[in-house]
Image (cartoon, helix red, strand yellow):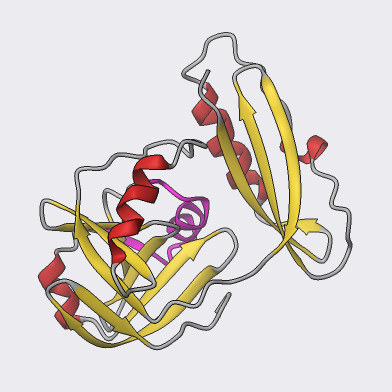
């Protein structure tokens, strides 16, 4: 049976942007007519009331399987390997084996930037956005529709676009988006056809 999960940011004992996680969780289970749907707020009880924690809710169509909490440890990212792949990951499945195999191809880089047929999609852990001098643009067809991406689109802070690899040359800044880092802005310092070098981003910018 397929298992899925939500990663939810717990800040000072409070779950952030839970409505967007609830929406994606329910959308995932709509594929199962007999799915058992609960309120995520009812199953999340942070053990600590201070600091930043990562909450992981694992579930399947029968219900929530387990909920875990762990301190958040941000990853240092100074370079991204550009990799072409037909990989698909439309739902937040616990089976990330295909992504993990792709991540192993990063060589000396810290992260990967996944491209399909010349168009940018995502990294292995986050949606992406690029600043064109006027607006923040995010790939129209991401690998996974993230909750932070959805919220910023709703707020009018992001705009969908088809972004090609060669467009990177016209951007000075990019951002990584996920529930834990929120909208983390990175300065692009250099790039080649298969690599982007960046200044370490400021977490939760």
State whether residue 78 is above or below residue 145. below
Q: Is residue 155 magenta?
A: yes
Compared to residue 191, the image places residue 97 above or below, namely: above
Q: Which residue is located at x 15 percent, y 67 percent?
A: 165
Q: Residue at image x 46%, y 52%? A: 150
Residue segment shown in magenta: 144-160
**Quadrant of res 174:** bottom left
Q: Across the whole image, how many numbered discs are drawn on residues?
A: 0
Left-right relation of 142 to 23: left
Is 153 drawn above or below residue 192 in the view shown?
Answer: above
Image quarter of the C terminus? bottom right
Question: Residue 101 vs residue 204: left or right?
Answer: left
Which residue appears farthest toward the top when viewing the image?
A: 34
Quarter assignment of residue 11: bottom right
Residue placed at 44% from the left, 79% from the top?
185
**Residue 172 coordinates in the image, percent (x, y):** 27, 86
| Left or right: 183 in relation to 88 | right
The quadrant in which residue 114 appears is bottom left
Residue beneath the point at 10% across and 71% down: 166
Task: Give how far across and how far down residue 170 sits, in percent.
Answer: 17, 82
Asked whether 30 or 152 is in front, the reply is 30
Between 6 and 101, the one lying in front of the other is: 101
Q: Is 149 contained in the magenta span? A: yes
Residue 196 percent location from the top left of the image: 25, 78
């Amino acid at each position: 049976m397929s298992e899925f999960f939500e990663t939810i940011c717990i800040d000072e004992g409070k779950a952030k942007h839970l409505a967007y996680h609830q929406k994606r969780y329910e959308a995932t289970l709509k594929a199962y007519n007999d799915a058992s749907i609960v309120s995520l707020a009812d199953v999340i009880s942070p053990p600590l009331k201070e600091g930043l924690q990562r909450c992981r809710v694992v579930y399947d169509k029968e219900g929530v399987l387990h909920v875990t909490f762990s301190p958040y440890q941000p990853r240092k990212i100074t370079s991204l390997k550009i990799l072409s792949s037909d990989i698909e990951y439309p739902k937040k499945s616990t089976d990330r084996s295909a992504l993990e195999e792709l991540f192993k191809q990063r060589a000396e880089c810290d992260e990967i930037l996944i491209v399909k047929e010349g168009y940018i999609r995502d990294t292995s852990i986050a949606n992406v956005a690029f600043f064109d001098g006027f607006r923040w643009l995010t790939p129209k067809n991401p690998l996974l529709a993230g909750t932070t991406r959805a919220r910023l689109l709703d707020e009018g802070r992001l705009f969908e676009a088809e972004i090609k690899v060669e467009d990177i040359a016209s951007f000075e800044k990019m951002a990584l988006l996920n529930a834990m880092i929120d909208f983390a802005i990175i300065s692009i310092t250099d790039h080649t056809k298969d690599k982007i070098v960046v200044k370490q981003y400021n977490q939760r910018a």
